[in-house]
Amino acid sequence: MTGATRYAPAASVNWRPSPLAVTLTVLASATLIGAVLLRRVEFLAFAAPLLGALLSAGRPSGHVEVSSDRDEEHCFASESVDFAVSVTAAGCVVERVSVTGADVDVVDTVVTWTSGGTVVRCQVRAPSWGRFAPTVTIALRAASGLRTATVVRHPVRLRVYPHPEPMRTAPRTTDLPDRIGAHIGRRLGAGVEFAGIRPYVPGNQLRMVNWHASARRGRLHVTERLAERSATVVALIDAWALRSPGGCPPPVRQACSLAVAGATQLARAALRRGDQAGVIALGGPLCWVRPDIGRRQFYRIADAVLDTIPAEGDTASRTGHSDLLPRGILPPSALVVAFTPLLDSRIATTLNDVRLRGHAVAVVDVLRDLPTRGETDPLVGAMWRWERTTMYRNFGLLGIPVVAWPHDSTVDEALAPLALRPLTVRRPSP
Amino acid sequence: MTVPLALAAGVTTLALLIAASGGRKASVRLREGVGLLPGVALACATVLVADALPGLPPWAWLGAVGSVATAALLLTALPSR
């Protein structure tokens, strides 16, 4: 969020005659015709002031500058945002200012007219996540109202993040990185979970001695405990289906939107547990955020995933990358959870490649409905579901578990089967 | 009706139309209309001078000039709407 004032470029204003100018022109024309037909100079005298006014209203050179107190506003879905827009006109008069938005609700607008210009204080509410630009429409007039113009500007951009819900499940891998965290790993260390009892060796701390076992065995024994480690979770968003040349049906767009929401929620939950979280977005230009910890990382991830879904109507196919990920973007022992509609074959290649690099991979199927437009035969739906089941089994044979995210369920419920036991990291075969 | 009276009627009509086009901001519109006064005054003076000159009847050549001006206005102003 920047605090600097942002000025929209002062583009040329397209002036047009106002209804008043048209009225004067028609009236003067009628009077002139009457004067010539009736041969009366009085009619001409009546029309002369009207014509004089019209001819003196030449092309105005007025321009308008629209500035906002902030370049971008950030908020979560269903939250309200306040912003102020200043409109300064030179050589013309601001007659009316209005703020509208196609996908945002304008809750309140207060217009203040000052000597220095017009200030519009507006409160908007975005019902869903995404990128929005509220439209500021300014009606101008010049030459005593004989010329009017309408200027449309977008001085403020809204970045609305998906609202992450609380999440209890925590998918993790068997091999956790050597960092202190909240997950109980397989290695021994200074945790609280009991691992076993072994004889004392010189160098062991005195507080590790298990006095009950030592008294029973007649020699010193110590208690071993499991280390608590943090995990590295990378959410992978598959938006390849959105970039298909023929456009995508509504179920696919909804699935990709669900993928973004799920990835954000998974990242938020991981960061709250103290784990490292990152994101990779496939489909458009390859976009990723390397895993890290902290609240700031969540906003980095949320910013990155917003650009994953192209705007409605943007069907430009800009893949920009192959189906193989660069080596450096996945740290060792990272768990990759892919949110995908499983429609593009490249996702299978990508996930298999990631698995062969030694990462645990899990898939969340976000496609809830048949990816078609309009009604289809029930038999088609049954065959599609059967095909999806086969696809799940094929992924399972590769060592990649797939869970569906059905209707009326949260991502927490969808990921619950993956959190029952640690996901195995399959080492690449030599 | 004499020519000065017709000129006064024209100016009054112009002022009324300007004031009525702004809704409740009639006074503001009239104040802005001061910028049109030079053009209106020039047009009125032209009519008065033409009426005083002997020879060709004023309705004829003023009608021709006015028609050309109106045609120019219609050709330039209306298409831009």
Image: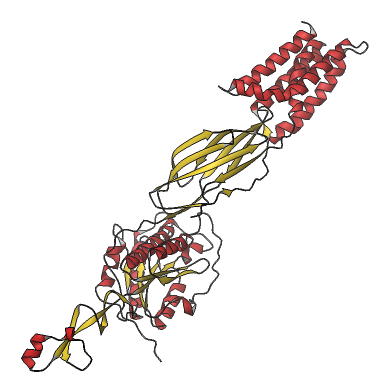
Residue drawn 38% across and 69% down? A293
Q: Is residue A337 left or right of residue A185?
A: right
**Residue B81 seen from this side:** no
Residue drawn 38% across and 65% down? A263
Above or below residue A382? Residue A60 is above
x, y percent for residue A20: 66, 25
The colour scheme of the drawn protein is secondary structure
Q: Nearer the viewer, residue A248 or A302?
A: A302
x, y percent for residue B34: 70, 23
Q: Is residue B72 left or right of residue A27?
A: right
Above or below residue A387? Residue B5 is above
Q: How many marks?
A: 0
x, y percent for residue A246: 52, 61
Residue A32, image quadrant: top right
x, y percent for residue A345: 45, 73
Q: Nearer the viewer, residue A340 or B3?
A: B3
Residue drawn 78% across and 25% down? B70
Q: Is residue B13 left or right of residue A388?
A: right
Residue A220, image quadrant: bottom left
Q: Is residue B25 left or right of residue A421?
A: right
**Residue B70 seen from this side:** yes
User: Looking at the rendering, in which quadrant would you find the C terminus of chain A?
Assistant: bottom left
Residue at the right extreme, as displayed: B55
